[in-house]
Image (cartoon, rainbow, N blue to C red):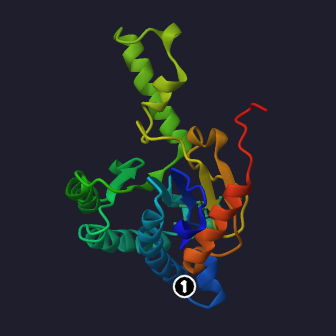
C-alpha cells in the first residue's frame, strides 16, 4: 500500500480510462465486454484511490465526442451506466465517497438523469473523497458554458467585463471550488487529453501507461504515484 512508502499523494487525480475496446478485441470479444470489465476496474480502483488519501478523483467515462460511435456500442455503454448508477447508490457508502457528475447530463435518457441526481443526492453529506464522474463531458463544451454564463452576467450588469479574472472562469466550470488536477493518468497508451479538463490541466503532470483500462490495478496506480513523486513541478518558475 502506497501510504507505507512516505510518498506525496496528489490532492486531485484525473484518469482517462482508455483501452476497453482493444482489451476486448485482443480476446476476440465484442467491445461492450471490454466496457463491462472496465466498469469493474472503475469500482475497485476508486476505493483504493480513496484509501490512499487522494481528496478529489475525476474519472473520464464518456466524452462529448463518444456519441459518434456505432449506436450498438453507445447503447451498450448506456446499459452499463444504468447498472453502474444503480450500484453506486449503495457502493461507496462505507468509504464515505461523495459522488458528483460533471458534463452535460441533459443529453441522457430521463431514467439515467434521475439516477445521476439520486446518486449525487444520497452521497451529498459524505465527508470522504470527492469522486467526479465525467459523463458527456468535454473540456471545450465546459469552457463554452462558462463563457456563455459570463456573457449573460455581463449583459445584465452583474459582472464588469474588464474585471473578469481566471478565478471567475474556474468558478463557472463543473469543478468549481475544487483544486486543479495535479496528476492526469491515461491508460491505453495514447499521449493526448482527448478534450479532458482542458482549462484545469494547465499544470497537471501527465502520466501515460500502455496498460489497457480493464487491466489497470492498485500496483499500476502506485507506479503512477511513484513517477509523480519524481517530477519537478515548477509552474513556470525556477
Ligand atoms: C474507453 O475505452 C471507454 C470509453 C471511451 C467510453 P475505448 O472504448 O475508447 O477503448 P479503445 O480505445 O477503443 O481500446
Ligand atoms: C477518451 O477516450 C474518452 C474517455 C476515456 C471517456 P477516446 O477513446 O474517446 O479518445 P480518442 O478517440 O482515442 O482520442
Ligand atoms: Mg479509446
Left or right for 233, reference 71: right
Q: Give residue 162's position: percent from left, percent from top.
A: 52, 8
Q: In which quarter of the image is residue 39?
A: bottom left
Could you classify mark 1 by the number of other residues whose Cα lies within 10 Å: few (under 14), some (14-19), or many (20 or more)?
A: some
Q: In which quarter of the image is residue 225?
A: bottom right
Residue drawn at point x = 73 percent, y = 52 percent: 231
Residues 238 and 58: in front is 238
Q: How many marks?
A: 1
Q: Please identify the quadrant where the C terminus is shown.
A: top right
Confirm if mark 1 falls within 8 A of ligand 1: no
Left or right for 10, reference 84: right
Q: Can residue 217 be seen in this view?
A: no
Vertical comparison of 151 with 191: above or below: above
Vertical comparison of 122 with 165: above or below: below
Label 1: which secondary element: loop
Q: In which quarter of the image is residue 131?
A: bottom left
Vertical comparison of 197 with 169: above or below: below
Residue drawn at point x = 47 percent, y = 57 percent: 54
Q: Can residue 173 be seen in this view?
A: yes
**Where ligand 3 lies, by quadrant?**
bottom right
Q: Give residue 137's position: percent from left, percent from top.
A: 48, 50
Residue drawn at point x = 38 percent, y = 74 percent: 80
The residue to which callout 1 is attached is 30
Residue drawn at point x = 54 percent, y = 55 percent: 14
Residues 44 and 64: in front is 44
Q: Give residue 154's position: percent from left, percent from top.
A: 41, 13
Q: Give residue 5's position: percent from left, percent from top.
A: 60, 67
Residues 5 and 91: in front is 5
Residues 223 and 191: in front is 223
Q: Which residue lies furthest to the right in this view?
A: 238
Amino acid at each position: 500500500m502506497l501510504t507505507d512508502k512516505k510518498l506525496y499523494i496528489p490532492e486531485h487525480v484525473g484518469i482517462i480510462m482508455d483501452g476497453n475496446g482493444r482489451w476486448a478485441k485482443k480476446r476476440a470479444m465484442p467491445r461492450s465486454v471490454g466496457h463491462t470489465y472496465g466498469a469493474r476496474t472503475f469500482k475497485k480502483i476508486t476505493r483504493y484511490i480513496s484509501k490512499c488519501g487522494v481528496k478529489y478523483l475525476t474519472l473520464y467515462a464518456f466524452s462529448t465526442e463518444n456519441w459518434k460511435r456505432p449506436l450498438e456500442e453507445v447503447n451498450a455503454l448506456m446499459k452499463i451506466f444504468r447498472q453502474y448508477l444503480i450500484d453506486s447508490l449503495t457502493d461507496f457508502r462505507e468509504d464515505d465517497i461523495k459522488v458528483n457528475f460533471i458534463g452535460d447530463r441533459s443529453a441522457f435518457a430521463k431514467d439515467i438523469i434521475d439516477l445521476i441526481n439520486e446518486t449525487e443526492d444520497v452521497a451529498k453529506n459524505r465527508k470522504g473523497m470527492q469522486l467526479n464522474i465525467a459523463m458527456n463531458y468535454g473540456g471545450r463544451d465546459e469552457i463554452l458554458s462558462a463563457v456563455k454564463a459570463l456573457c449573460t452576467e455581463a449583459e445584465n450588469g452583474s459582472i464588469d467585463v474588464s474585471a473578469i479574472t481566471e478565478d471567475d472562469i474556474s468558478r463557472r466550470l463543473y469543478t468549481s471550488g475544487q483544486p486543479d488536477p495535479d496528476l492526469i493518468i491515461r491508460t491505453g497508451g495514447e499521449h493526448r487529453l482527448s478534450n479532458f479538463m482542458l482549462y484545469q490541466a494547465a499544470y497537471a503532470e501527465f502520466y501515460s501507461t500502455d496498460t489497457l483500462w480493464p487491466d489497470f490495478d492498485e500496483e499500476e496506480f502506485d507506479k503512477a504515484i511513484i513517477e509523480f513523486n519524481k517530477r519537478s513541478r515548477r509552474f513556470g518558475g525556477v
